[in-house]
Image (cartoon, grey):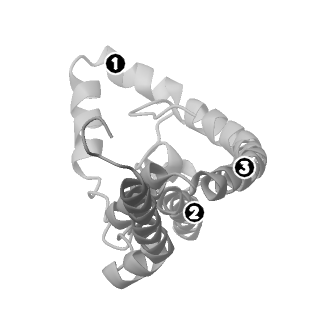
Amino acid sequence: PIRLGYAPREIMEWELEGLQRFLPLEIEYANRMHEVQAGYERQLHEQAATARFLARISPAWSYFNAVSGLAGTDAEAYTTFLAKARNYRLQVLNYLSSKDGLVSYRYFTRLEPSRFRTTAELELLQKQGDRLKQEMGKDWDSVPPLDLRDLPTFDHAPAPVATAVAGVLPDVVLLVFLNLALFLAAHVCFLRTDVRAGG
């Protein structure tokens, strides 16, 4: 639906009728698209988890995984963010529904329905010169501003440090173990090799 600043009562009623018919369908289609996308993301997340598990053989990957986990930019943080964003969408929809803001005139105008003028009334005001502009301005000046203090806020705080450290601990332990194992292997190879010139 479009946002209407000022229109005849007939247009406002037509817009509300369309809104009541099509907004629930739009929400239903958005929910269905979300289900498809969420299924794809779950499958992708499972594949990525398998790839991350296999990639742990590489010290570079273990380092990357540990650092991204501490920085909060790993795949788990991304998945958590998406889940919080989806929950916030539902909170906003519930908030708007509780304020009668989804399928009512409030969705596209803040004027009270009793103040809507018919096309004939607007044409009459238009014939009176500046009277239409004065009336429209008066109507909008008397509309109180939106009170959004109780609008749910999106709260995405990073994971606590203790949780982040616990999450990357296996990678750090693996990284230390791989470093020790590779150092010992290099040391053993060095001990077996005669480094004297010509020997």
Dot 3 amino acid type: Gln
Dot 2 amino acid type: Ala
- Tag of residue 83: 2
Residue 170 position within the rendered picture, expressed as x and y whole percent measured from the top left: 50, 74
Answer yes or no: is residue 152 visible. Answer: no
Mark 1 crowd level (few <14, some 14–19, many ≥20, 10 Å Cα): few
Residue 68 in the figure: left or right of residue 43: left
Indicate which label's residue lies in the foreground, 3 or 1.
3
Answer yes or no: is residue 4 visible. Answer: yes
Disc with the residue nearer the chain's start (3 vs 1): 3
Report, in whole angstroms, how far the alpha carbon at label 2 lies from the one at label 3: 19 Å
Disc with the residue nearer the chain's start (2 vs 3): 3
Mark 2 lies on a secondary structure that is: helix
- Tag of residue 126: 1
Residue 15 in the figure: left or right of residue 85: right
Mark 1 lies on a secondary structure that is: helix
Dot 1 amino acid type: Gln
Q: Residue at x 59, y 63 (%)?
A: 90
Q: Is residue 170 above or below residue 194?
A: below
Disc with the residue nearer the chain's start (1 vs 2): 2
